[in-house]
């Protein structure tokens, strides 16, 4: 979540949908990266033209997600999902200079008439867990990502490889494809 420092304290920026629409104009944003987390923790995104975003989209969401393309989400016959941008997560992406871009982290909603929180959405799961904790008498619960990294045993780069094959090879006992899993 974007933040500011006031009197030496970190305070989250609490953008509303109106704030975000104004910031998009003020910052000259051309594209929005609508980001969400998959069931296995991988960050996914879809990019849309900034002028496509309307105030109603923060309430209703955007029909921009094929759930069958996300591992662990849905089968092809029930794949239409909705991504609902969270205005409090708006942030400018400074490393995309040519086309000013900002990002919004999104919740996933089930498609169709009933647009409820999608059961396999990690953000929805954590929100439901936090609600459950509060309903059971606890005031505070902390939720956050787990940062992971991978250790490579060997990395080979081949600049002489022909155009029809890979030019690198990664060897790692930790990799899912390894036959030497530890």
Image (cartoon, rainbow, N blue to C red):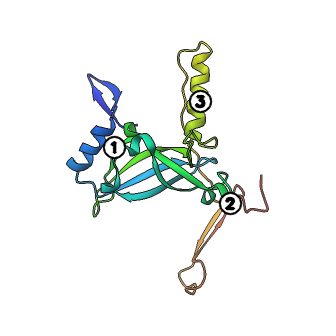
Instruction: Classify 10 Å Cα crowding around label 1: few (below 14), some (14-19), many (20 and above).
Output: few
Residue picked out by circle 3: 128
Residue picked out by circle 1: 55
Does any portion of residue 113 appear in the rendered image? Answer: yes
Residue 112 image point, x, y percent: 57, 49
Compared across the picture, whether 179 is left or right of 172 comes to: right
Count the numbered circles shown: 3
Compared across the picture, whether 95 is left or right of 60 comes to: left
Cα distance between the residues tagged 3 and 2: 37 Å
Front position in the image: 170 or 31: 31
Residue picked out by circle 2: 172
Foreground mark, 3 or 1? Answer: 1
* Residue drawn at (70%, 55%) of the image: 174
Do callouts 3 and 1 mark residues in contact (Cβ within 8 Å)? no
Relative to 166, is 62 above or below?
Answer: above
Residue 42 image point, x, y percent: 57, 51
Q: Residue furthest top?
A: 137
Instruction: Classify 10 Å Cα crowding around label 3: few (below 14), some (14-19), many (20 and above).
Output: some
Residue 116 image point, x, y percent: 56, 39
Q: Secondary structure at mark 3?
A: helix
Q: Residue furthest left?
A: 26
Front position in the image: 54 or 16: 54
The answer to which of marks 2 and 1 sits earlier in the sequence is 1
The answer to which of marks 3 and 1 sits earlier in the sequence is 1
């Amino acid at each position: 979540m974007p933040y500011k420092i006031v009197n030496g304290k970190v305070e989250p920026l609490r953008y509303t949908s109106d704030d975000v629409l104004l910031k998009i104009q003020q910052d000259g944003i051309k594209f929005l990266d609508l980001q969400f987390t998959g069931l296995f923790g991988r960050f996914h995104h879809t990019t849309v033209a900034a002028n496509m975003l309307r105030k109603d989209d923060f309430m209703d969401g955007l029909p921009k997600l094929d759930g069958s393309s996300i591992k662990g989400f849905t089968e092809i016959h029930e794949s239409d999902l909705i991504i609902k941008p969270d205005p409090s997560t708006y942030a400018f992406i400074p490393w995309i200079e040519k086309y000013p871009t900002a990002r919004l982290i999104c919740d996933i909603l089930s498609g169709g008439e009933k647009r409820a929180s999608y059961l396999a959405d990690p953000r929805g799961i954590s929100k439901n867990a936090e609600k459950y904790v509060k309903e059971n008498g606890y005031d505070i619960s902390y939720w956050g990502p787990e940062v992971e990294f991978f250790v490579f045993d060997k990395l080979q780069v081949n600049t002489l490889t022909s155009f029809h094959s890979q030019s690198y090879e990664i060897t790692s006992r930790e990799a899912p494809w390894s036959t030497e899993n530890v």
